[in-house]
Image (cartoon, rainbow, N blue to C red):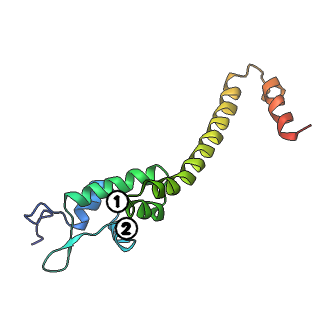
């Protein structure tokens, strides 16, 4: 019979932790290989994840959602130095600002098409201005 996911000591097996966050178990193993997770082991050598590991997985997922790479996340977790943290985050912030600007420009273009009263959007003055600006002088 399969033992409980909680080994009686407030820990989870890899499958239970992965399921809790909607991840595949190989993702957690990869993060361990990268040095992002350090699970304990039971007497049989199976991974056991405690409360600190749950917090760490949530933090990794949050940082990934912010667009940070696993390498950057690992570097951030390895330093408490503010200057180093800023050096690691500055390029990510700049890239995100650039992506936001591009997304905003795309939204403006789409909203212009939605708000255009011309039957043929290619005759819309806003459309024509955008095309002309893309072509240059």
Task: Please give the label number shown on residue 96.
Answer: none
Single out the residue that lies furthest toward the left.
8
> On screen, 35 above or below 96?
below
- Say if 79 sits above or below 117 in the image: below
Q: Residue at x 54, y 51 (%)?
A: 90
Q: Are marks 2 and 1 in contact (CB under 8 Å)?
A: no
- Whole-percent x, y for residue 15 in the image: 25, 65
Q: Is residue 56 left or right of residue 120?
A: left
Quarter of the rendering occupied by the C terminus:
top right
Q: x and y percent of residue 128 in the render?
A: 84, 29
Q: Is residue 122 at least partly visible in the picture?
A: no
**Which residue does the image show at 52% across and 56% down from the upper left?**
87
User: At x 70% / y 32%, what residue is drawn?
Assistant: 109
**Residue at mark 2:** 31
Check residue 23 in the rendering and tell me which mark sits there, or answer none: 1
Q: Residue 19, percent across and down?
A: 27, 58
Quadrant in which residue 31 is drawn: bottom left
């Amino acid at each position: 019979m399969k033992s409980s996911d909680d080994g009686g000591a407030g820990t989870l097996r890899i499958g239970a932790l992965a399921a809790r966050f909607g991840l595949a178990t190989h993702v957690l193993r990869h993060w361990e290989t990268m040095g992002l997770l350090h699970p304990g082991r039971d007497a049989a050598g199976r991974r056991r994840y405690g409360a600190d590991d749950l917090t760490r997985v949530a933090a990794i997922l949050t940082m990934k959602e912010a667009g940070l790479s696993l390498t950057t996340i690992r570097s951030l977790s390895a330093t408490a130095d503010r200057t180093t943290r800023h050096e690691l985050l500055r390029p990510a912030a700049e890239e995100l600002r650039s992506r936001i600007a591009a997304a905003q420009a795309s939204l403006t273009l789409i909203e212009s098409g939605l708000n255009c009263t011309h039957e043929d959007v290619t005759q819309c003055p806003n459309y024509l201005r955008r095309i002309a600006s893309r072509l240059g002088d």
